[in-house]
Structure formats: C-alpha cells, structure tokens
Image: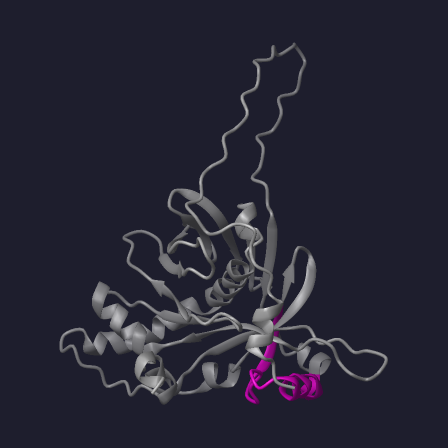
C-alpha cells in the first residue's frame, strides 16, 4: 500500500501559533534572599527540553540476522518510498520511545565509484505485527538526498567544498535544502522555514557548529537558541533537544530536525566527494561530473511543468 502524501497532509493538525520572530521569555524577578551559613548553593538551572529526539545509526553486521531480508521486504511492499536497494540502518526515538526506522541505499553509497555515488536516506514509522496478520506502520515520514550538482554550484559560490542536501516531507509541498556555508573556524549550515499557514513568516535556521568531538550544533533563529544537536561518533548517535515550546509543537519543524540529524551522519563523506569534484573545476569553472536525471529534475521549472 502506497503512502498518500495528501492523506498525510489532512491528518496533520494546524499549529496553534504562526511562525513569528521568536523572543526570549522574560524571567520573573525574585526578591533577594539572604544566604544563611551552612546553606548549599543551588546548581544553575538547565534549559527546559520540550522535545527530545535521538537519531541512532546502530546497524552492524550482527544485526543482519536479527532483521533479515523478510523485514525489509515488508516495508518495500507497504510503500514505494522504501526502495529495493535500501538497508535498514537504525532507528529514531521521540521522547524516549522508539518510533521510526532509518533506511538508505548503503551499498550504492559506500561501495560505488565516486562518479556513481548517490545518497538517498529516509525514515519510516516502525512496522508492528497485529493479531489479524496486517502490519501497522511502515509509513514514509521524510527523507534527505545529496545533490552533488547543487553542491558544486554552492562550492563555487563560497569557494569551499559545500555539500547540499534536499529534505522532503510528505504533505509538505516544499523541497528545502540543508546548505553548508563558510566559517573560518568550525562549521555552518542553514535551512529555511517557508510559510505554510496564515501568519507564518519566512525564517532562516542557523546551525552553528560547536568545536569538539562529533557533530555538535547550536540551532538559532535570530539570536534565540531553538535547539541543539549532540553528536556521539562512537555510538553513531545524534541527540536532538528542542528548547522552544512552540517549535516543539511544530510537526514540520520536528521532522526537519530529524532530517538534519540524518544529514549529520553523512556530512563528512559528502564533503570529501564534493571536494574531489570541486578541486578539478575550481580553476576552469567546468566540471567533468555528469549529473544524473534525479538531480537534473531538481532544476526543472515548476511553471513549465504545469503545462
């Protein structure tokens, strides 16, 4: 059974608040209290986490027997978004509960020659067996795709290797891009939040890399810290915390955060690939890379497609 994007769109509830300029809440003023001898000072308060996500690429060869080909065939039969060349490579937890599985074209990405490398990574709701033999779940929730063609264009613009990933969510008619920018120290990524409903404003999310082991980012809109990504390279895990209550209730934003967590796993390898192609075109402005049809289609004029 194919997952219907229009059906997914109807089931999504509208947000209570439109996306407007996020402002910091004013702290309530407290009366000065006298510290008595022997009192233990209170530790500094931590940020309130309104939504916690964990993107975990746990897959090893030991999991092959546990999952088996049969499990992957069930997802393939449920939705066309689960390709035949996909391998299940991890899971996603939302507020401590495992909700989804991660799958991507592992063999094509890791074993193909550089000219034919392609990455498509998607996540699906976990499929559960029921008494009537009809499995529940297995629905496509979102995916990312590396566009080397757009990456070379972006690299030429900023004069540094800059991967570009496209993010897709069923029910959302926009294709947004996770774009690597240039920063003298550390990394910098950005992606837009486009207006979806009345009152929404165009917003840019800045993902500023934090120096340290793994992929760690602070995500801000303007000057306000909205979320954080804590990468754990040994576990191949990315913990995401959303600090703003309104954005934690924004389903599209939560899915974008999951997709950004997926992107973090492939950033390093994608940069190496783009760097090799960009190095050859840096002086001439001409690349030998032959864009596949899947990437060329992303340049198609939507106004001409309607005719």
Residue 188 at x, y percent in the picture:
35, 56
* Quadrant in the rendering for residue 32: top right
Count of picture labels: 0
Considering the image in quadrants, where does the C terminus appear? bottom left
Is residue 172 positioned above or below 185 on the image? below
Question: In the image, 287: left or right of 255?
Answer: left
| Residue, far left | 284
Q: Which residue is drawn at 23% across and 86% down?
A: 288
Magenta part of the chain: 68-91
* Quadrant in the rendering for residue 102: bottom right
Question: In the image, 164: left or right of 126?
Answer: left
Question: In the image, 23: left or right of 242?
Answer: left
Is residue 45 positioned above or below 52 on the image? above
Report whether residue 257 is seen: yes
Is residue 215 positioned above or below 108 on the image? above
Is residue 270 positioned above or below 1 on the image? above
Residue 64 at x, y percent in the picture:
67, 81
Q: In this rendered view, identify the residue nearer to me: 87 or 33.
A: 33
Residue 302 at x, y percent in the picture:
34, 79
Considering the image in quadrants, where does the N terminus appear? bottom right
Report whether residue 233 is seen: no
Residue 220 at x, y percent in the picture:
42, 48
Q: Residue at x 68, y 73 (%)?
A: 126
Q: Does the magenta stretch include residue 70?
A: yes
């Amino acid at each position: 059974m194919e997952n219907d994007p229009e059906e997914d769109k109807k089931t999504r509830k509208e947000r209570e608040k439109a996306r407007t300029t996020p402002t910091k809440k004013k702290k309530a003023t407290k009366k000065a209290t006298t510290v008595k001898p022997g009192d233990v000072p209170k530790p500094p308060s931590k940020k309130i986490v309104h939504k916690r996500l964990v993107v975990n690429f746990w897959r090893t060869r030991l999991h092959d027997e546990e999952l088996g080909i049969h499990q992957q065939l069930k997802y393939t039969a449920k939705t066309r978004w689960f390709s035949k060349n996909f391998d299940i490579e991890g899971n996603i937890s939302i507020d401590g509960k495992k909700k989804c599985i991660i799958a991507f074209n592992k063999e094509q990405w890791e074993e193909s020659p550089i000219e034919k490398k392609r990455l498509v990574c998607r996540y699906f709701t976990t499929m559960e067996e029921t008494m009537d033999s009809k499995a529940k779940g297995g629905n496509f929730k979102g995916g990312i795709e590396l566009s080397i063609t757009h990456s070379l264009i972006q690299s030429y613009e900023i004069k540094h290797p800059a991967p570009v990933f496209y993010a897709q969510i069923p029910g959302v008619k926009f294709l947004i891009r996770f774009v690597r920018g240039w920063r003298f120290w550390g990394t910098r990524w950005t992606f837009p939040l486009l207006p979806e409903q009345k009152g929404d404003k165009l917003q840019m999310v800045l993902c500023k890399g934090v120096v340290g082991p793994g992929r760690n980012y602070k995500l801000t809109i303007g000057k306000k810290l909205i979320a954080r990504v804590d990468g754990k390279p040994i576990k191949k895990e990315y913990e995401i915390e959303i600090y703003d209550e309104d954005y934690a209730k924004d389903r599209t934003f939560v899915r974008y955060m999951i997709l950004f967590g997926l992107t973090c796993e492939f950033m390093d390898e994608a940069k190496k690939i783009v760097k090799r192609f960009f190095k050859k075109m840096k002086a001439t402005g001409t690349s030998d890379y032959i864009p596949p049809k899947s990437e060329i289609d992303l340049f198609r004029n939507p106004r001409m497609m309607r005719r």
